[in-house]
Image (spheres, helix red, strand yellow):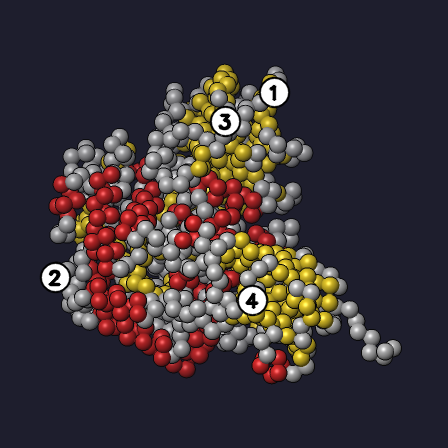
Amino acid sequence: MLVSNTLLQVIEGHNYLDLITNAARYRIILMKDEVIRIRCSFDEQFVEEASYVLAMTAWEDKLDSIVDGRKKIEALPVNYQDSDTQFVLSTQKLNVIIHKQPFAIEIQDKQGTVLHADLKERSYVKDKQGRLYHYSCMNDEDYFYGFGEKAGALNKKKRRMRMHNVDTLGYDSEHTDPLYKHIPFYIKLNGKTQQATGLFYHNSYDSVFDMGCERSGYWNPYSYFCADGGELDIFFMYGPEIKDVVRHYTDLTGKTILPAKYSLGYMGSTMYYTELEKDSDKAILSFLDKCKEEGIPCDGFFMSSGYTTGQDGKRYVFNWNNDRFPDPKAFIGELMQKGAALVPNIKPGMLTTHPLYKEFDEAGAYVKDQNGEGPQTDRYWGGLASFVDFTNPEGRALWKKHLKESFISLGVTSIWNDNNEYEINNEDALCDFEGEGKPISELRPIMPNLMAQMAKEAIAEVEPNIRPYIVNRAGFAGIQRFAQTWAGDNSTSWKSLKFNIPVILGMGLSGVANQGCDIGGFFGPAPEPELFVRWVQNGIFQPRFSIHSCNTDNTVTEPWMYPSYTKYIREAIRLRYKLAPYFYSLLFEASTEGSPVMRPLVYEFQQDARVWEESFDFMLGRSILVANVLEEQAKTRKVYLPKGCDWIEWNSKKRYAGGQTIEFDVTLASIPMFLRTGAIVPMAVGLNNLHQDVMEELRLIIEPSEDASFVLYEDDGLTNDYQRGAYLQTTIRVKAGQETVISFSNEGEYDSTLKTLVIDLICKEIAPVQVKLQGRKLAMFLDPKEWNDQAEGWYYDTEQKTAKIKYSQLQTDYEVSVHFDVKDLISI
């Protein structure tokens, strides 16, 4: 076993510092004031920089030409002070202290608060099996979040978790580990200092995090990361807020790709239709017609892999079953006419009986056996298969060729990448790795990322101005740059409904803002009516909203499967469509800032200790607290409202002080939601299809008792014209006071379709006395019917304590001022 205990030599390079110890070599790079890279190798030299993952570097990398949009920055100069016992490197925000003996690295803020400390005498270790360990000190006050897609509660303290992609059909969302994603990143919040930091381990070998599960009386409390190989390549990120850490992490690994707007709609799906003996196309088209008949909006259909079934009953990627789909191009065209995108399921494992197997084999496009002499085969759905090697230029080229021929040439610009965990059991199977060769054990989780990248590139090569919509089941750090993800084949149960929420919240804290789960449950019997209603009511808040099933009792999970309950499903989905402008603006924020869409309460209320372990109530963006009913036969619901603001119940507009737990009655129709003070929520009126309907009226809910701002984002939702300036960012600012001013300032060149804007201004104590638009008084109405008939004006809803202000949308920057002076009717 090798352990770094003594610092022997310091070598200063250009914007880095190399440290030579008795066991390993280290390189410290100050990337930014808040981001420190610590690279550790137990070999004599570092391997060549070659990352498929990093979106930001401060060095040359072998794969720069392959990683699209990688940003290069200049690292900070390395200035340090030397003393008898330590070196100290400094940035504007941090001090990095290198203890000479025993060797360890400690990071402090400028006030001397310890943010991270290696466990001295066993900080960096390599064992006889080649496994690498990094041990960190931990405190009783520490809370740990992130880790990608992990089952169980939000806080992962006292958990041991394995990082490995695996196909976990019917998993237990509270206990199963690992799941489909492999993201070796976490956020630590210290409850005593209330400061947040992050650690990203840039290592794609299988690994383990132990967050205080292991203890030893000989050592202070510790956590550790253990990887099966590679290097300990660690990126430390400083907050002090959780949202700062997430922003820095997504600077490193990339922001969430801005999706096509229709992806926010309801996406129908089931395995059942594509397993019919024939006429699966008609079944899917009939599904869309039924949606319209039932008044349920729908914008697409995830088509399961039964469409690829060959004569022998096996699934063959890129193959269309002509009994089920006689004319794929015509079918896709009919879907588009009905306002729905087709999202076909594709898989990277190709059965040895596949008609295209030989073509890929002759091109050397598969992951090879350990001798590099032929394709590696392994278990897969349907039999033995080989797996396309996306680290091989030939594999990438062939894959894109068949994507274009089978789908994109027919009008498909949405791809569903499934079963891409690369469960190859021979750890020594060889990947091409751009001609240099590396074992699958080092590259397994990278493959699904590259698979998504190839879909993005293939669509761009055929339809350069169409925005791709890609969905991935597996992935590594950075998957958000290419794809929306979902939490795989969940089981049908109340537990899945409940614990899929922290699974999604953890992904959001791990950089993947666009995420969801199969609504209603994928694997198991049909959900009983109450469970189905509650799952839809929860699912409408997930960025990916799809009811998808493979029921084990010969049923199909459809919105109308329980006719007497369809009204609840319909109303929930319609609420989803009303919130579409808010969702789209939040996804734009994710694409620029890295912010999650669904946010754990601790993300917004880090100073409130009572939310540090809240796993099930969450924020939708900054403004809306969602407290879904998650318990069977619930008649009441308790919810803790975080301190620091007031809360307004969504429907009644009843106001509550923060920092208290309230209890209220619920019915099957209940979707408990609360607005925080300072909320700004844009909502659509009359949208039933995001492909075809034009948003002409916008409803803007504003709670104006504190200063706030929100960016409403608009573009055409389908093309890449936004990258060339065809977008509109409207910054809405609220200046609170006796005269409340709501200002609108625009950036961009997109011609908005909005014609009418209605502001629902939630008033705290009194009604307005006057409303002005650009200094011009708006007419005040006492009768809401009369107000409704006019093009502009305002009235006060006494029951809701809401001033409703309506006017024609202006194309320039402007202000609305609302005066809250008390009008003295007596003295006059």
Q: Confirm or deny contact between disc 4 and disc 3 (CB under 8 A).
A: no
Helix, strand or loop status at disc 2: loop
Viewer-side label of 2, 4: 4
Disc assigned to residue 262: none
Disc assigned to residue 809: 4
Say which amino acid is labelled 1: Gln
Q: Alpha-carbon neighbours of circle 4 within 10 Å: few (<14), some, or many (≥20)?
A: some
Q: In this image, 560 relative to 743: left or right? A: left
Q: Is residue 651 visible?
A: yes
The tag earlier along the polypeptide, 3 or 2, is 3
**Residue 229: x %, y % from top left:** 36, 33
Q: Alpha-carbon neighbours of circle 3 within 10 Å: few (<14), some, or many (≥20)?
A: many
Say which amino acid is labelled 2: Gln
Mark 3 lies on residue: 28
Q: Residue furthest right?
A: 827
Mark 2 lies on residue: 311
Disc assigned to residue 81: 1
In three-dimensional space, the C-alpha distance between marks 3 and 2, rounded to whole angstroms, equals 58 Å
**Residue 158: x %, y % from top left:** 51, 46
